[in-house]
């Protein structure tokens, strides 16, 4: 049973400057909820109750968001505004939040290794909050991955097909399809050029990782962009046949890009208010 979900949330969000100058990118709202709240809700829906968040300087508003604001509670008590806090109140009640800081920006693999202190020796989920996933007619993407984990008991990555022009934005995998939409991974490469890419199956920001990943990350050398890449660490597990890729059901919005963020905003607005 996986109960912990790690949120790497220390990045600068440079693509959204100046909005992210003094505000974490994870707090940018899609309609009226910050991105990270959608991620926490997805983790909760998948059975995780401990949210382990790797933050950095300037990210304190994330902690405040997942805490009770007594002044605000007092102000709106008994008014019709109370209903707008119901969802976040229920999240706060159901989850425990723990935080640690990544004080050097050495890549996603390094961020995940920084979270080891919050995770310990158990399998855990990872959500990159700027990949916003939505599956209105069924289980959330992380919940679907939990089912796959129950069966295969190894690391699970979520994948989707992307245009070959876009492969240099993602970790790209190659594997053997063992069930419809489920692959045993044997190769992975972080952000390859179009002509180096072994496929157009891109890793998106949802992972289930077994705890041996920490030992692997400790000895993983800096890769693409001089950073410690989770893709390189996963490749070591893949070589032992211990990584399954899953073509999830649902939709993903790349809210780390302005175009994806606007698309998510429009779609969520449509589905919530029309
Ligand atoms: C990270 C990973 C990459 C993955 C992507 C999904 O890249 O390194 O393998 O495909 O997330 O969003 P980033 O987008 O942080 O550069």
Image (cartoon, helix red, strand yellow):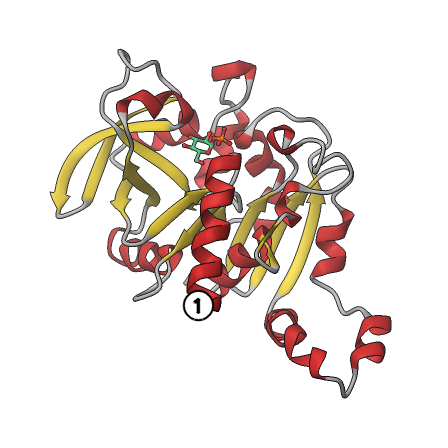
The reply to whether the residue tagged 1 has its Cβ within 8 angstroms of ligand 1 is no
Name the image quarter holding residue 46. Answer: bottom left
Name the quadrant of the N terminus: bottom left
Q: Is residue 10 visible?
A: yes
Q: Residue 76 in the image: x percent, y percent?
A: 79, 79
Q: Is residue 15 left or right of residue 253?
A: right
Name the quadrant of the C terminus: bottom left
Q: Is residue 232 shown above or below 4?
A: above
**Residue 232 versus residue 274: which sits nearer the camera?**
274
Furthest-front residue in this view = 274
Could you say whether the residue bearing mark 1 is in a helix, strand or loop?
A: loop
Which residue in the structure is indicated by mark 1? 274
Q: Residue 31 in the image: x percent, y percent?
A: 57, 57
Q: Is residue 46 shown above or below 61?
A: below
Q: Is residue 243 visible?
A: no
Binning the other alpha carbons within 10 Å of mark 1 as few (below 14), some (14 to 19) or many (20 upward) gives few
**Residue 81 versus residue 160: which sits nearer the camera?**
81
Q: Is residue 70 shown above or below 247?
A: below
Q: How many marks?
A: 1
Furthest-top residue in this view = 195
Name the image quarter holding residue 51. Answer: bottom right
Q: Residue 257 in the image: x percent, y percent?
A: 51, 34
Kindly identify the residue that appears in the image at 62 percent across and 42 percent down.
9
Furthest-bottom residue in this view = 78
Q: Residue 108 in the image: x percent, y percent?
A: 54, 31
Name the image quarter holding residue 65. Answer: bottom right
Kindly identify the residue that appears in the image at 31 percent across and 21 percent down.
165
**Residue 245 versus residue 150: which sits nearer the camera?**
245
């Amino acid at each position: 049973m996986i109960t912990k979900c790690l949120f790497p949330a220390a990045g600068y969000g440079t693509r959204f400057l100046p909005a992210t100058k003094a505000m974490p990118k994870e707090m940018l709202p899609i309609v009226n909820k910050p991105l990270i709240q959608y991620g926490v809700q997805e983790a909760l829906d998948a059975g995780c109750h401990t949210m382990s968040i790797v933050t950095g300087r300037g990210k304190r508003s994330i902690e405040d968001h997942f805490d009770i604001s007594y002044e605000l509670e007092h102000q709106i008590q008994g008014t019709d505004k109370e209903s707008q806090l119901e969802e976040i109140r229920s999240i706060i009640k159901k989850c425990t939040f723990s935080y640690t800081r990544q004080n050097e920006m050495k890549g996603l693999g390094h961020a995940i290794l920084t979270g080891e202190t919050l995770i310990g020796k158990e399998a855990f989920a990872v959500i990159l909050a700027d990949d916003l996933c939505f599956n209105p007619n069924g289980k959330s993407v992380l919940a679907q991955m939990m089912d796959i984990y129950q069966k295969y008991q190894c690391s699970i990555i979520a994948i989707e097909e992307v245009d070959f022009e876009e492969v240099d934005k993602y970790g790209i995998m190659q594997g053997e399809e063992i069930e419809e939409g489920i692959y045993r991974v044997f190769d992975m490469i972080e952000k390859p050029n179009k002509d180096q890419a072994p496929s157009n199956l891109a890793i998106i920001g949802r992972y289930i990782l077994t705890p041996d990943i920490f030992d692997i990350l400790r000895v993983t050398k800096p890769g693409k962009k001089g950073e410690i890449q989770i893709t390189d660490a996963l490749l070591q597990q893949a070589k032992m046949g211990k990584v399954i890729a899953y073509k999830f059901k649902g939709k993903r919005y790349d809210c780390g890009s302005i175009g994806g963020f606007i698309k998510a905003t429009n779609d969520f607005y449509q589905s919530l208010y029309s």
